Image (cartoon, rainbow, N blue to C red):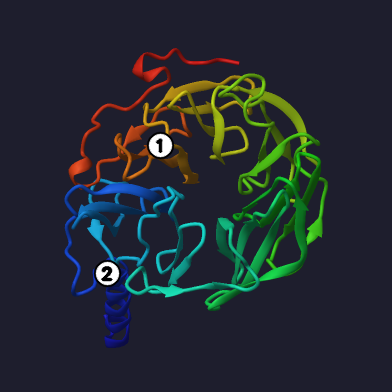
Amino acid sequence: MSTPRRTALLVSLLALLAVFAPPANAGTAVPQGFRPASTSWTGRDTGYVLGYSPCAGSWCPALVGTTDGGRHWRRLGTPPMPLPDNHNHVSLTFVGDRVAYVSDGVHLRTSRDGGASWHPVGLVGAREPYYLSKIAETGGRVFAVLTTYGEGRGSTRLYSAAAGSPVLVPVPGFAVTGSLTYGDLAVGGGLQVALGADYGTEKYWTSRDGVRFTPADPPCPAGSVAALAGVRDRQVVALCSGSPGSPQPGSTERRLRHAPRLGGTFSGGDAAPFTGITQAFGAASPTSATVAAVGGGTGFLHSTTDGGRTWTTTVLSERGLGLADLDFPGGGTGVVVDGQPDADGGSAVYRTTDGGIHWREVAIGENALADEALRPGSLGEPHVVV
């Protein structure tokens, strides 16, 4: 082997190790009492969890990562993001293995060295109270959905900037106003942006490069809110949810819609189970999708593998404080976070490897509690078939 080739291999190996090399002042072990707050996966076996552990009468953050599907974890740099007193969800988003974002809905920080160091990102023109609900990076640009609240009037708009920029700015023309506004975005196979207001005004755009956008017919009919999944095998899947609490308290009417391609017309309308208030949505393939919902203090994962014709429901726990970060990074593998770190019932990360049919609690440090996979109807609840 030639010297240049040996040198190139050595550099590649060192770069790979650097991704999971902790800072000098960080331990390699998961902190005692660690409870997950958010998770983000860049592949079926590579994932990251931001969590908190008790310290000095408060909760201290810690970031850990795995490259083997959660069998082993390594401590990474610590994002300077305290656990919010208002129970806002602290959201972690990794883009590859070097770029990451963390937000508590108001503050936003980014890392471009695998979590070793973190820097603030400003939001131009954003005035509190507001909530940053989604952030993603694709095509060399960063995108975020921000909702501002007012006295009976609010707005939801799209923010963006070049990757690495210290500030994000509103994108002209990408905004809705009303008494109740909302929005979502999805990356993977192209960029999708959906904004809506008062269950009546719905706008939807697609882009293949993050620069040029094309307006398209909204995924959902009037009276429902769109939750977006990335393009799967060239097809697009969306969940359309009605007003929370309908048809009865603790429930939501939901339907799956499909488009044959990015920017194509959505059709169909297979009904999903209505138990629980919709918390998140994700799709592993054009036919496999999961809805995370909470109702009556219990978390539910409604999953389909046949495009919405039939469904099974997995009951996760009675933590009842929300499900977050539902995502399918590839190969039928999916993850979701149940609960909150400072709640009495704690929190946990669940993972599936079969598109959402079976879920298993991921062991992280002392949280090695679940050896048996949860199956539809776990905890005494029957599975639901629609």
Give the SS element for disc 2: helix
* 169 lies left or right of 15: right
Residue furthest bottom as drawn: 3
Q: Is residue 173 left or right of residue 209?
A: right
Q: Vertical placement of 175 versus 385: above or below?
A: below
Q: Residue furthest front?
A: 151
Q: Helix or strand or loop: what does disc 1 sit on?
A: loop
Q: Say which residue appears at 29% left-offset and 50% top-offset.
A: 68
Amino acid beneath label 2? Leu
Quadrant of the drawing holding the N terminus: bottom left
**Number of other residues with Cα within 10 Å of mark 1, as a class: few under 14, some 14 to 19, many 20 or more:** some
Q: Residue at x 56, y 74 (%)?
A: 163
Please provide percent x and percent y for residue 345: 30, 34
Which quadrant is the C terminus positioned in?
top right
Residue carrying label 1: 353
Q: CA distance from mark 2 to mark 1?
A: 26 Å
Nearest to the observer: residue 349 or residue 80: 80
Q: Amino acid at mark 1?
A: Thr
User: Which residue does the numbered mark 2 point to in the structure image?
Assistant: 17
Residue 348 in the image, given as x and y percentages of width and height? 33, 40
